[in-house]
Image (tube, helix red, strand yellow):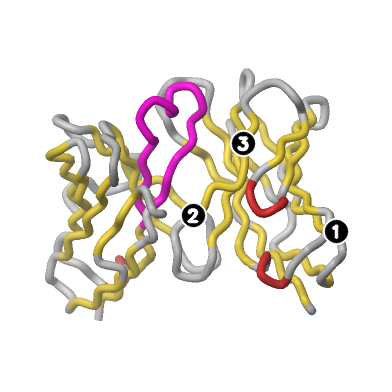
Amino acid sequence: GAVVSQHPSWVICKSGTSVKIECRSLDFQATTMFWYRQFPKQSLMLMATSNEGSKATYEQGVEKDKFLINHASLTLSTLTVTSAHPEDSSFYICSAPKTGGYQNTGELFFGEGSRLTVL
Amino acid sequence: AQSVAQPEDQVNVAEGNPLTVKCTYSVSGNPYLFWYVQYPNRGLQFLLKYITGDNLVKGSYGFEAEFNKSQTSFHLKKPSALVSDSALYFCAVRLPSNTGKLIFGQGTTLQVKP
């Protein structure tokens, strides 16, 4: 079964509104989670690294005020797309390393993704 | 710069035939290499990984991959393709530093025809 749960799977919003996407680790604690963005027929672009209890680390070119990341607990990270515009429409995927394995292997478990459409 | 390349946008094979999805990498130091599969509108599923040891790695759903250090390659293979193997495949490499980032290739669409 899934070890990382992402919600919602699909969301449609009006331009100018904000949308929150949740990423939960199931049955394990994740001090670190990663948020990716995927454009149609393209690879995954790492947006930011979410760190429990501290600020997220954003990749170059990603607007931190646009994409707010909060990692308030060891099992939950949220990505909020603020003042969304049509160009923010994309597939957003979170991932987390399973405790105990990551430092040695780098294996990540991925959520099912969230399809955001901004009208 | 560290990178991962998947030279083929799409690979077409007939069901029952062997398949290969190519991946080459450029990373300083000893890489950790991964293959993931993605079905439409879904997240990524882990297939297999190479960390150290035997160059031939066996993974989920009958897939395997061979690490070739001299050619800096990590091609994904399967002896007999199934129609259900049709999906988007990503090769990824973990940076030697302890940042935890995976760098993904651009993806290869595998189409298996009956």
Q: CA distance from mark 2 to mark 1?
A: 23 Å
| Residues packed near mark 1 inside 10 Å, few (<14), some (14 to 19) or many (20 plus) | few
Q: Chain of mark 1?
A: B
Which badge, 2 or 3, comes first in the chain's sequence? 2
| Residues packed near mark 2 inside 10 Å, few (<14), some (14 to 19) or many (20 plus) | many
Quadrant assignment for the N terminus of chain A: bottom left
Q: Position of residue B91 (x, y in %)?
A: 62, 46
Q: Read off the residue under disc 1.
A: B18
**Image point (51%, 53%), residue name:** B45
**Image point (68%, 36%), residue name:** B25
Q: Is residue B55 above or below residue B66?
A: above
Asked if badges 2 and 1 are on one and the same chain, I answer yes
Label drawn at residue B44: 2
Quadrant assignment for the C terminus of chain A: bottom left
Disc 3 is placed on an element classified as: strand
Which badge, 1 or 3, comes first in the chain's sequence? 1
Left or right, A33 with respect to A79, comes to right
Q: Chain of mark 3?
A: B
Range of residues picked out in magenta? A93-110
